[in-house]
Image (cartoon, rainbow, N blue to C red):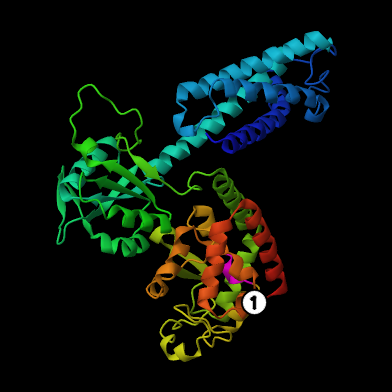
Amino acid sequence: MAPIRQKLFCMFDFTTLFVGYMSASWFATFLRLRLSLGTVSGDGGGFGTAMVDGRLPPPHECLWMFVIVAPTSLICTEILGGHRAIRDQRPILILLCGVMSAAASVMMLMTMCIALKTPRYSGLVLFTVAAETGFAICFSRFVARAWFHYAVREGMYAQNIAIVGWPDAAILLAQRLKKAGSPSECRIVGYFSLVPNAGTLTVGGGMALQVLGGLQDLEDVLLNVAIQRIIVVLPEADNHWLSRVIRTCDYFRITIEILPEAVLTACLRDLVPLASKELTGIPSLTLSSPDAESDWLYVKRVLDVFVSGTLLIVLAPVFLLVACAIKLTTPHLPVFYPWRVVGSRGRRFTGYKFTTMVADAEARREELAALNEMTGPVFKIANDPRVTPLGKFLRKYSVNELPQLWSVFKGDMSLVGPRPAAPCELEGYEPWQKRKLSAQPGITCLWQVRGRNRISNFDEWVRMDLEYIRNRSLWIDLKILARTAWVVVRGSGC
């Protein structure tokens, strides 16, 4: 696990342990009253010193216990491998981490009590602290593990894979992938054939390999089909086309895996691959974007989930007020407008905005085409007659964009990123403009904070998106979010 991810895992454990510690006082009091243990003498019966009217002193009076328990548990968990990726943690390892952390915490508390000659603490207190520590470690991991397996079953982590090669080699590789990985890990969407007029291939076991086109179709397919990885089966001869495939994947930041056809077809008896990929098990050269597994993208996703989740809860009254306002002013219109767009690497999804236009807005677009103030495929009018009176207010303060927080929380979008493209807009993109789809789309980006109402050139807009993609970092995201907040307060929306 990357260092920063491991630190975040430790911070999560620390928070969980603190919650467990804060509940320990209540839990110990509950057990004492439930079991009718009676009042304990002043020299050793309390959470800190002694029981008071049958209750334990508040946690802040004995915070030193948490200061001992937390690092002891974290170190013990780290030694046992409890901070590895959650997919690598088996139930027996999780239980071992919980039990050993609890035992180590109790031993450290008893040692400190003896060394510092503090008042003797009851077995109930030690049991409560140990139970809360072990429970916190185990519960958090079992929940995370359950979520991980649910996400795997739902295909949330599955990679869409396309094969480039001769038909026979494509069939062989598809069979290998089918045997090595389940559909929850990888989905083969088809293959790019090196021969003209190729058709669908029969892999076996009821599986068919659809032809996506030839190499000349690679760029268009990557824009319209969500593909995360290209696997190239390199033939022993006639591989002059490889440089074109590499350049296209590099432009769109698509991971490409190159494996020799000779190794794929070889029947090895004694030799085994020393360097292999997880899916194919075959030695290969992998070219990937440098930020594909970067720490900052992981932190960015954590920030997206935390901020969007918090805002969805905090702004729930605002959502309700806006929904009521829309229904009162325009009863015939739905509250939410489904926004069907194309996201990163051609992945299509449906986002939502508050409805701000009349019902026949799309039908009236053609008649208003002459008023379009944007060059290129994007349609934009400053004083759009299709916008409702309430919609003008919502757009002025960007309130209509708030439902997109749900798309951020789900993972379809990010807080910061290039604006997603509508399918009809994508058809009018020039080749160099299509690179903006190599990054996850976002609610706000450089265009929004650099005066979106003053920019009428779509090329300039795309250049800002590409500038963000080249230079993006967590610091830049935070600056854009801060400037976006100021733009919203000023009412600079449209």
Identity of the amino acid at label 1? Lys
Please tell me in which quadrant of the rendered image residue 43 appears. top right
Quadrant housing the C terminus: bottom right
**Looking at the image, is 467 positioned above or below residue 398?**
above
Give whichever of 197, 350 is nearer the camera: 197
Please tell me in which quadrant of the rendered image residue 284 appears. top left
**Is any part of residue 55 visible from this angle?**
no
**Looking at the image, is 373 positioned above or below residue 35?**
below
x, y percentage for residue 31? 67, 22
Give whichever of 245, 465 is nearer the camera: 245
Q: Secondary structure at mark 1?
A: helix
Which residue occupies 39% across, 74% down? 424
Q: Label 1 belongs to which residue?
A: 396
Q: Residue 267: say if magenta.
A: no
Which residue occupies 47% across, 91% down? 370
Find the magenta span and give its range.
Answer: 398-403
Is 8 left, or right, of 280 in this rendering? right
**Is any part of residue 287 visible from this angle?**
yes
Q: Residue 401: say if magenta.
A: yes
x, y percentage for residue 149? 42, 37
Which residue occupies 29% across, 52% down? 242
Is 385 left, or right, of 278 in this rendering? right
Is 249 left, or right, of 83 in this rendering? left
